[in-house]
Image (cartoon, coloured by chain):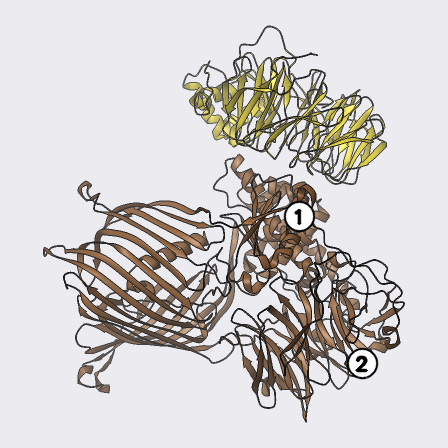
Chain colours: A brown, B yellow
Amino acid sequence: MKRRMLLLLVLLAWTATSEGQYYFGRNKVQYNHFEWQILRTRHFDIYFYPEMRELAEIGATYAEEAYSRLENLTNYSFNHPLPLIFYSNHFHFQQTNTIPNLIPEGVGGFFEFLKGRVVIPATGSLSEFEHVINHELVHVFTHGRANRILKDHKRTQHAGLPLWFTEGIAEYWSEGWDSEAEMFIRDAVLAGHLVPLSQMYRIYGTFLMYKEGQAICKFIAERYGEEKLLQLIENIWKADNFSEVMKLTLGVDYREFDKVWLYHLKKEKYPLMEENDAPGMITRHLTDKGISTKPAFASYGEQREIVFMSNRVGYSNIYRMPYGLERAEKQHLETLVDGERTTEFEAFNLLRSKLDVNRRGLLAFVSKSRGHDALYIYALSQKQILSRHQFDEIVTISSPSWSPDGNRLAFAATGFGGMRDLYLLDPATEGLTKLTNDYYDDRDPAWSPDGRVLAFSSDRTEYGRQGAYNLFFYHLDSGEIEYATYGNHRDYAPAWSPDGQALALTSDRDGAFNLWMLRVPHQEIQVATTARLDNPYKNGGLAPAPLYPRAINGAAEMRKLTSFTTGAFDPEWTDRGSLLFTAFERFNFQIRELENVAEVFDKAKVSVVDTLHVRRPPWAIPKLNGEMSPTQFSYKRKFSLDIAQSQITQDPIFGAAGGAQLAMSDMLGNEQYHFLVFNNAQTRSEFLESFNLAVSRFDLSKRANHAFGLYHFAGRYYNYAEGYFFERRYGGFGALSYPLSVFERVEASVNVRQSHKRWEGISVARDALLVSNFVSYVKDNSLWGPSGPVDGRRLNVSLGYTVDVRHSNVNFYTILADYRHYFRLGLRNAYAVRLQTQYNHGKEAYPFFMGGSWDLRLYPRWRIWGQKTFLVSQELRFPFIDGFAVAFPFGGLGFSSIRGALFVDAGNAWDQKLDRILGSTGFGVRLRVGGFLVLRYDLGRRFYWNEIDRGLAPGKLKLDRRVYQQFFFGWDF
Amino acid sequence: MTKANQPGAGEEGITPAEVAGYETVSQSPVHGKRKSMFKKSPIGCLLILVMLAGCAKAPLQLQLPDQPQQDWRIAGFDTRRSSARAESLTVPLQELARLKLSSAAAQNLFVARGFLFVPTLDGRIYVVDLEKHEVVRKWKLPQGNAGTLTATSNSIVIAMRYGKHTLAHFDLATGRRRWSIDAGDIASEPLIADSLLFVAALYQHVDAYRLRDGQRRWQFKTRAQLHASPALGEGVLVVAADDGMVYGLRPETGKKIWETDLERPVLATPVIQGQRVFIGTARDQVVALDLFQGQVLWRFANPGRVFHAPAVNDSLLILACADGRVRALAPASGRLLWESRALSVIGTSPLLAGETVFFGALDRHLYAIHARDGELIWRQELHGRVRTNPILWQGHLILASEDRELYIFGSPQPAGGD
């Protein structure tokens, strides 16, 4: 439905006249040109590009395995190939045209049900890739099964499965239960913000809802039987309300289920408090606002600082604050790099890449820039960027680590193939060395203080297929890799102690992510191998040679430093023997400090020994072969229907109109056709001349998007300026949009049309062959709050010229300028300014309309018109009510972030002379409903500034004593 | 008698006149129930109106052949649910007729006195004259409910999955309803033996009713819901519950003889052969139990889930599995004899007809494989997924596909017979 609306809006935008060019918004930039191929397996058509052929084959295997499992699990299958569209990384995925929306960093894949497409990016981790494939295919199977059941039982109006269930079962059937899910549910239960199933509407669409759905599905399987999950789908036809379906299937409705489930969770989680603690209760708080992650300790000269990333103001920025000072976050916090506002720093990923500072005070960090990651070196003392490093063959970069001498950097990166490997960079020479080159996911490199070894985390272990990561040592002199830890768990983010005697890390080996410490047995690193493990597969001789860990004789003793109920990540040593880390608590990530680590280590109650007598090779990647071998062919555009709908409308003035809309596109959404047909004849004689037709074609496959189309519009129209008139327009248009970056674009269009216009009542008509040209510049880096922008800027400048090339009846030029600036006054408050003018000048120039909730508030909507307009708006935006919920006997509604506004508007429209300014001031309330609609209520007074053509005398300013109010919908300007 | 072979044709004969026949009973033994329904239910009122409208023809007022045939009156053919016939068919089969239904057919089809009864998932029942290959009756069940049925030589019992008055008994010759009762939601197939009707109701009870008047004779309660149908052999009624509990009951009294916990969900109907009960579970095992004591005789580790009743004869236990495999085990030992593969989930119970095993799959194919080694003999593509169990009647193989088609196949030269 959302897609339908968007397509409709796009259609209307492109087929309208000059007003169609007038909008803001960020851009989906096609940085790359993909030569799409198709890999056909038994059940899938897999779309990929040649650089990621290996990954596509692996994905094909995972998809076929998932298909067999789900077929068996759901007793269902498909009789057509399922389209799977793979991208080798998230940045390429963000360029997909399968959906029109901009895709945020957090989206790991999606199932688009109109064409049944599954679109998935790789992340560098094959286990994660497999998980997402499984997750999305669960959606495909449950959606297909439920739809079939409803169709068979003739329940076509049914709302379908609820979102908490579809997402919950997708997670549960794809990964069961893992330490991440456990972390979120533990936190929700122990912090008291778990939302009962009967009130799930309060967190509709949130990540917490997904995780709660997963927990509910797990509980149903364990308490009522695993077969009940499938029966919940099979019984969907029995009732319109899923609570009733649960009652029929499990014997309990939502409220009855809550009693059992919540009791179970409390009984299970509360005892954890006896042996574990909440991070915030026993460690030192360093940050408390926004999401703050990836602390790096900086010690250079006399300075000792903490550098970290945070979205505390909405945008993601890099900050620093002095280390060791009380209230440093409140009093000494300094923004180093502003993110998400410029092309250089398009996005910092708060959860993906660490920061590192060397002894000279040089900060290494990663930012997305122009379609792929760039590595920046920033001098903390001078507060400036020293160098920027970006490589054609590298798409994503993460976790740079300085060598002890501060001259080289190690980092993890993925290329076009989608595999994450380790690299070395000499920033001075730009010399880049690839250290590993295989299918395993190598991440979090950490350079040892003696400069000889890189510790890193990798899934190159026999448990890697299950998602396990162990720590390894990479010997820089020999290129040998050795196990540092071993087992079926996840060990991440090694951090060397300053003396090189210990590694701090985060591990989920006891069920939750906690900080652990490994005493490094230096002598054993040098022990010769006892068994060189064979390469489990060949990788085609790519250079350098693939490296596989060797077994060593030894053991790794580890002790648990923290016993948190939730989670701790990204340990970083300070020079005081403490650890900075990111803690998860109360559904948030903050930076904490664990002090006296050596003492904690000595007193640690929990210790484990990883036996490093590893005999089995790392996991091998299964591939389809024999009769299952896929076939490959090139992608050719074939079009299928996206929407087809008809409608009949009845208007008291314009009578009845009936019509239909169609939209078609290819599988990748790169080429789209839109058709519009309707007739608004009021009498039989008008039938033929009142046909409205439009066809347009969009090509989104390249960076420069272009469109063209033909149309014929005719009918009786009305506007306040001209009254009733009949107009018939037919012609064609062409448009081009070129994004300079995510934030900026230029647009151009030409529109040629024959216009016949006949005013009613005065028997005047005119014919014109109109040619309109427009060129626009649009910039938008605004940050949006619940009801509209709260930070950043937006600008739109358009110039146009319209002329009647045959009769010279029409001849005017157009200038449109709209500038909006949002000043952040606090975390939740903003001051917004809008300066806008619209200027048409010439023969039969179109009028512009003003008035109403969208521009000049408290005036009647679109009742002020003229060929020229100006508008100045100022608004103070602030939180009004943070949330309330209404519960009805049949369900409930939840509202959050109700915003307030104090505003002053001034403006007017005129043709020849501006002699009066209209204004309004008042208070407004904004209520966001369902994520896509904002309801607006304004209350206040009007004012007028008369005779301004004689000067802006204060005495001419009049305040209207009456109180006006206005209710409408729409986002804040 | 209205005849139609198109889904739209004859529809008007269903709603007023035929519903009248469905509900018009003058001498029901369950007076209280009927009275109450007519007083409170709008459907009851509607029926009265329809009766007053003067409709005379009853839906099941069928012209019955003089000689009863070898009918397929119960899911699985016999009370043991064996799905096995000595009668064989020569493949390739020819499509004799294809009829359009209003929706996908339910899991099971039934034949009584030469008439095929086809319940559909949108709550209709079609009656097809198998001699003429024509739809002769169809009517809509109350509340658009999906139903199933079982038949005797002169009557049928309709069981519904959801709602009230979920069990009703009709006379085939007169079309009169003999009785109807609220038996609870029923997700399984009823079973008729001698003068008793056995029903495993979804919400945890097994009931025996007197077929003559619908009086309940006994009830046995289970801990979990019941999706599997009861099977009866050698004087033991076997019932399997969703939670994996299998019960052996005395059919006369409902008294429990034994119970065995399989510790894994059971959704497929158990089958009985000789002194053994065979149960395919919805997780990872097929189990054989002693019919009289419930002891586990053998377990077979089955990679596929079993959602459909197996077919069984003296020498073969044929399993239809959701992993797309048909597996044949030795009933005595549980040894895997052969394995055959379809292109997708096996969507039906297998039908063992002579030396041939027929089954349908979600890959839209009807398969015929050799019972000796599982080798594919013949495969016929249909228009939709196959989820309706194939049945055999007088040289006809009958099944339906998900795209609302009912298929009647026949051998070019029928061979053998019971």
Give coordinates of residue A254: x percent, y percent.
Answer: 61, 49
Q: Give B368 or A653, whichever is nearer the viewer.
A: B368
Q: How many marks?
A: 2
**Numbered tag placed on residue A147 in the rendering:** none
* Dot 2 crowding, Cα within 10 Å, few <14, some 14–19, many 20+: some
From the viewer's perspective, is residue A662 above or below residue A938? above
From the viewer's perspective, is residue A121 above or below residue A295? above
* Dot 1 crowding, Cα within 10 Å, few <14, some 14–19, many 20+: many
Q: Earlier in the sequence, mark 2 or mark 1?
A: 1
Give coordinates of residue A435: x percent, y percent.
Answer: 71, 70
Q: Which residue is mark 2?
A: A500
Q: Chain of mark 2?
A: A
Q: Chain of mark 1?
A: A
Q: Give B264 or A311, whichever is nearer the viewer.
A: A311
Identified by mark 2, the residue type is Gly
* Disc 2 from disc 1: Cα separation: 44 Å
